[in-house]
Image (spheres, grey):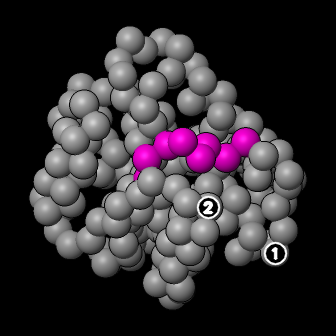
């Protein structure tokens, strides 16, 4: 199964784009487990929560993949996001996360040119461009397949559609 992973900093269109592409191609989508986990947490998260989030994200990917007969799986995030979150926030990352990253997936790196919108889980309003560069550097240095999207949603959807159509 081909995995298409939407990655990038906060408010860069990951969720909107992943949902739009999943709908357009009638594909299964793996939601962002961190949101599900953190919305139920009755305290501030800490470093140890990131491993739980990573395992939950992997479990969702595996379950969604097993329950689908499609050739492509859309992921609204994956362990790369959790790894960079951990490195940026705590300057370290659990080896489980690093060892279970998906190096075969195709990544859609979303540029943060949308206006930042508050929600209680977001933390990085002022350093999204710096964080974007960290995502890009990680994708390049680990030699992953990726494209970068920016601009209006319609333009991004068109670019991603062309990218996926070349795979199928």
Tag of residue 91: 1
Residue nearer the viewer, 12 or 102: 102
**Above-or-below relation of 71 to 33:** above
**Above-or-below relation of 21 to 133:** above
Q: Is residue 103 magenta?
A: yes
Question: In the image, 102: left or right of 111?
Answer: right
Residue nearer the viewer, 35 or 164: 164
Label whose residue precedes the other's in the sequence (2 or 1): 1
Quadrant of the frame with the C terminus: top left
- Quarter-wise, where is residue 25 in the image? top left
Q: Residue at x 67, y 46 (%)?
A: 101
Q: Are marks 2 and 1 in contact (CB under 8 Å)?
A: no
- Residue 15, given in percent of the width and then of the height, sits at 38, 51
Distance between the Cα atoms at labels 2 and 1? 19 Å
Q: Residue at x 19, y 56 (%)?
A: 159
Q: Residue at x 47, y 65 (%)?
A: 8
Instruction: For residue 122, say whether it is visible.
Output: no
Mark 2 vs mark 1: in front: 2
Which stretch appears magenta?
Answer: 100-107
User: Magenta: predominant secondary structure element?
Assistant: loop
Q: Residues within 10 Å of mark 1 (few under 14, many from 20)?
A: few
- Residue 4, given in percent of the width and then of the height, sits at 41, 42
Q: Residue at x 29, y 51 (%)?
A: 17
Q: Secondary structure at mark 2?
A: loop
**Above-or-below relation of 162 to 65:** below
Q: Secondary structure at mark 1?
A: loop
Question: In the image, 41: left or right of 31?
Answer: right
Query: Can you identify the residue that label 2 sits on?
Result: 142
């Amino acid at each position: 199964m081909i995995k298409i992973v939407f990655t990038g900093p906060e408010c860069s269109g990951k969720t909107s784009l992943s949902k739009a592409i999943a709908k357009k191609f009638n594909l299964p989508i793996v939601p962002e487990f961190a949101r599900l986990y953190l919305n139920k947490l009755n305290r501030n998260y800490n470093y140890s929560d990131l491993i739980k989030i990573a395992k939950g994200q992997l479990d969702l990917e595996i379950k969604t993949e097993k329950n689908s007969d499609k050739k492509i799986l859309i992921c609204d995030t994956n362990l790369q996001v959790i790894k960079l979150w951990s490195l940026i926030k705590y300057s370290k990352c659990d080896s489980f996360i690093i060892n279970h990253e998906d190096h075969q997936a195709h990544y859609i790196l979303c540029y943060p040119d949308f206006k930042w919108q508050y929600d209680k889980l977001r933390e990085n309003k002022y350093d999204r461009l710096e964080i974007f560069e960290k995502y890009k550097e990680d994708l390049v240095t680990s030699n992953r397949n990726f494209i970068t999207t920016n601009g209006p949603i319609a333009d991004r959807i068109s670019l991603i559609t062309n990218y996926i159509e070349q795979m199928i």
